[in-house]
Image (spheres, rainbow, N blue to C red):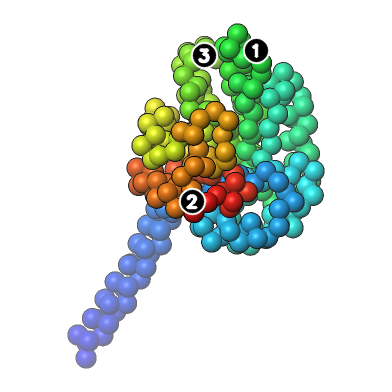
């Protein structure tokens, strides 16, 4: 009887120790990062059919443009379907006037009621007519704006859309490196406009950014274009259609780290894309 009692106490003690170890280890182990499947949503007035389309295609992030906060109801519906929503804004003129973008962020704080996960800025310096003559100045201003916003609003997550060709060497705060490295350094995440119509093409134009982000522990989301392009059909899946794009994006996913992602530009073009 004494032997049985001792063994029983040892068994209980072992279970307690195991439970304690499980608790300790679960507190130390970080949850597995999700792979991002995102989509740009430029028109806040789109109906719930588009949201159903996004859900059916496993979207877990939406970049939602609603500068006047006219449709927070659909944003709430997105969140109820386990989709993270980022407030999407962008004007190239903000590079000339940081106070304007600061005012936008202050409006976001006042009106968004904490419903968004962060802000995605699509500020494209190459849209200026004199960009080629003043590349260094405009790219410096972009980096400077990103630092300005981070310092002004340290608690807000700022993501930035950038093209894949920001290789210009820029000196900022005494550090000279390619512009894309400066942006990856300061951003919460970078959404890279890696617009090509094949998995190999998307990876090829993004490999330097992928390598750098992975090295410093940052996240890159590769953008895929579904809209008809005025430039060349190699930048968009418009000609190839939904099925081909889906196949290629699965290949891209397999080549990226788990905490990276893919986003499609944009919800209306994607939904209307031929099969």
Q: Estimate the spatial distance between the alpha carbons at disc 2 and disc 3, rounded to whole Å.
A: 38 Å
Disc 2 element: helix
**Mark 1, residues whose alpha carbon is within 10 Å: few (<14), some, or many (≥20)?**
few
Disc 3 element: strand
Q: Which of marks 2 and 3 is in front?
A: 2
Would you name the residue on which mark 3 appears?
A: 170
Q: Estimate the spatial distance between the alpha carbons at disc 1 and disc 3, rounded to whole Å.
A: 18 Å
Residue 130 x %, y %: 65, 12
Up the image or down, 265 lies above or below 210; here it is: below
Up the image or down, 236 lies above or below 140; here it is: below
Residue 274 x %, y %: 52, 51
**Mark 2, residues whose alpha carbon is within 10 Å: few (<14), some, or many (≥20)?**
some
- Residue at 41% x, 62% y is 23
The mark nearer the N terminus, 2 or 3, is 3
Q: Nearer the viewer, mark 1 or mark 3?
A: 1
Residue 196 x %, y %: 45, 35
- Which label is found at residue 242? 2
Q: Can residue 258 be seen in this view?
A: no
Residue 94: quadrant of the picture:
top right
The mark nearer the N terminus, 1 or 2, is 1
Relative to 136, 107 lies left or right: right
- Residue at 34% x, 42% y is 255
Disc 1 element: loop
- Residue at 74% x, 58% y is 73
**Closer to the camera, 176 or 163?**
163
Relative to 219, 79 lies left or right: right
Q: Estimate the spatial distance between the alpha carbons at disc 1 and disc 2, rounded to whole Å.
A: 36 Å
Up the image or down, 269 lies above or below 173; here it is: below
Residue 131 x %, y %: 61, 14
Up the image or down, 73 lies above or below 143; here it is: below
CB atoms of marks 1 and 2 within 8 Å: no
Would you name the residue on which mark 1 appears?
A: 130
């Amino acid at each position: 009887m004494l032997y049985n009692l001792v063994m029983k106490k040892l068994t209980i003690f072992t279970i307690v120790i195991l439970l304690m170890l499980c608790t300790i280890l679960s507190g130390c182990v970080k949850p597995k990062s999700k792979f991002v499947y995102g989509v740009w949503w430029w028109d806040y007035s789109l109906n719930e059919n588009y949201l159903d389309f996004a859900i059916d295609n496993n979207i877990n992030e939406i970049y939602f443009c609603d500068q006047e906060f006219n449709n927070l109801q659909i944003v709430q519906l997105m969140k109820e379907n386990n989709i993270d929503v980022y407030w999407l804004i962008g004007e190239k003129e903000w590079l000339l006037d940081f106070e304007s973008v600061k005012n936008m962020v202050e409006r976001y704080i006042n009106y968004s009621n904490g419903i968004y996960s962060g802000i995605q800025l699509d500020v494209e310096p190459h849209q200026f007519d004199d960009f080629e003559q003043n590349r260094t100045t405009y790219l410096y201003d972009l980096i400077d704006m990103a630092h300005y916003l981070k310092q002004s609003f340290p608690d807000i997550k700022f993501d930035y859309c950038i093209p894949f060709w920001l290789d210009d060497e820029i000196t900022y705060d005494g550090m000279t490196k390619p512009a894309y490295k400066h942006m990856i350094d300061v951003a919460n995440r970078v959404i890279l406009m890696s617009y090509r119509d094949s998995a190999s093409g998307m990876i090829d134009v993004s490999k330097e950014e992928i390598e750098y982000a992975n090295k410093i522990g940052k996240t890159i989301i590769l953008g895929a274009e579904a809209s008809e392009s005025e430039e060349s059909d190699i930048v968009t899946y418009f000609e190839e259609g939904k099925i081909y794009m889906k196949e290629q994006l699965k290949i891209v996913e397999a080549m990226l780290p788990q905490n990276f992602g893919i986003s499609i530009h944009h919800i209306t073009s994607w939904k209307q894309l031929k099969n």
